[in-house]
Amino acid sequence: MPFVTSEKMLTDAQKGGYAVGAFNVENMEMVKAVIAAAEELKAPVMLQTTPSTIKYGTLETYAAIVAAEAKKASVPVCLHLDHGNSYELAVDAIAAGYTSVMIDGSHENFEENIAVSKKVVEKAKAQGIPVEAELGKVGGKEDDLEADADTNTDPDEAKEFVERTGISSLAIAIGTAHGFYVGTPVLDKERVSEIKKLVSVPLVLHGASGLTDEDVRECVQRGICKVNFATELRAAYTAAVKKLLEEKPETFDPKKLGVAGMESVKELVKGRMKVCGCDGKAV
């Protein structure tokens, strides 16, 4: 199945009361692992790259790898720009073959966030590409992106933001953080329900690595349609490689290291897909 955009899979999730798992990938092995998990569970899937990952491997390289693997898959596969930090990067991602983009203007004030998000929407929608934006600030650090404090999304502002920008999906802040949590996160889950009442587009949860299954499930039940996982995939991949080298220090073939990493990531992704409820939803 060729690339698809995120629009149908997220609207289907919204109607079906589940969430699509969106997984950040860093290399070919992680791409293969995530798509293999989706194949086994018959789940729609989104693969994502952040600006720092793109700097490492380039938009064209990731687009080519995911396109090649998606072509062999029987489930819908989308490649999404995660936390796009400029209009120019979003435009370049579309040109490279990405089938969904995020513009993250959450570090700007409300009006500036609207302006940059609307500008990306106008460009992307002309080419049939859906756009995710963020309102409020998700704390923690992911790659080069860092927020000093959490500012949860205001429901009324969310309604205005969606109406004025024309975005396809909205990432909201409810107390989650990027990276692993230092303490126990306190999530304002009721805020998901409040925003859902006022906003028509699918809602997105960032910073899900380290959340309990129960937390994720409740957020999905309240209206989250896409859940992002990044840090825990990196940790699983690295831990598997370290374990292999500890057990067999004579290993020097990168392919064997890659196989170990892939198996670990695949099992993790399968578990997260089941928590999101997207298993068996590929059509």
Image: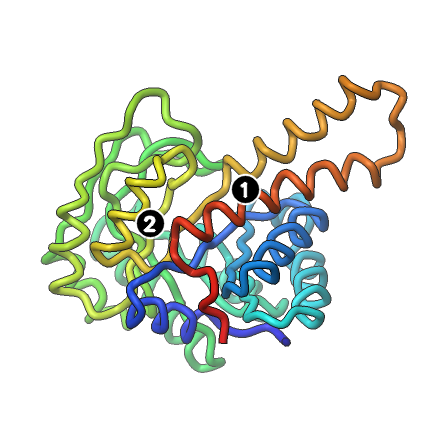
10 Å neighbourhood of mark 2: few (<14), some, or many (≥20)? many
Choose the circle earlier in sequence order: 2 or 1. Answer: 2
Question: Residue sitting at 54 percent across and 65 percent down?
Answer: 42
According to the image, label 2 marks what residue?
Answer: 205
Task: Tell me if I can see residue 84 in this picture.
Answer: no
Q: Give percent across and percent down for residue 2.
A: 63, 76
Q: Is residue 270 above or below residue 188?
A: below
Q: Give percent across and percent down for residue 112.
A: 27, 55
Colour approach in the figure: rainbow
According to the image, label 1 marks what residue?
Answer: 268
Q: Give percent across and percent down for residue 26.
A: 63, 45
Helix, strand, or loop for circle 2? strand
Between marks 2 and 1 in the image, the one whose residue lies nearer the viewer: 1
Quadrant position of the N terminus in the picture: bottom right
User: As shown in the figure, which amino acid type bears the numbered disc 1?
Assistant: Leu
Q: CA distance from mark 2 to mark 1?
A: 18 Å
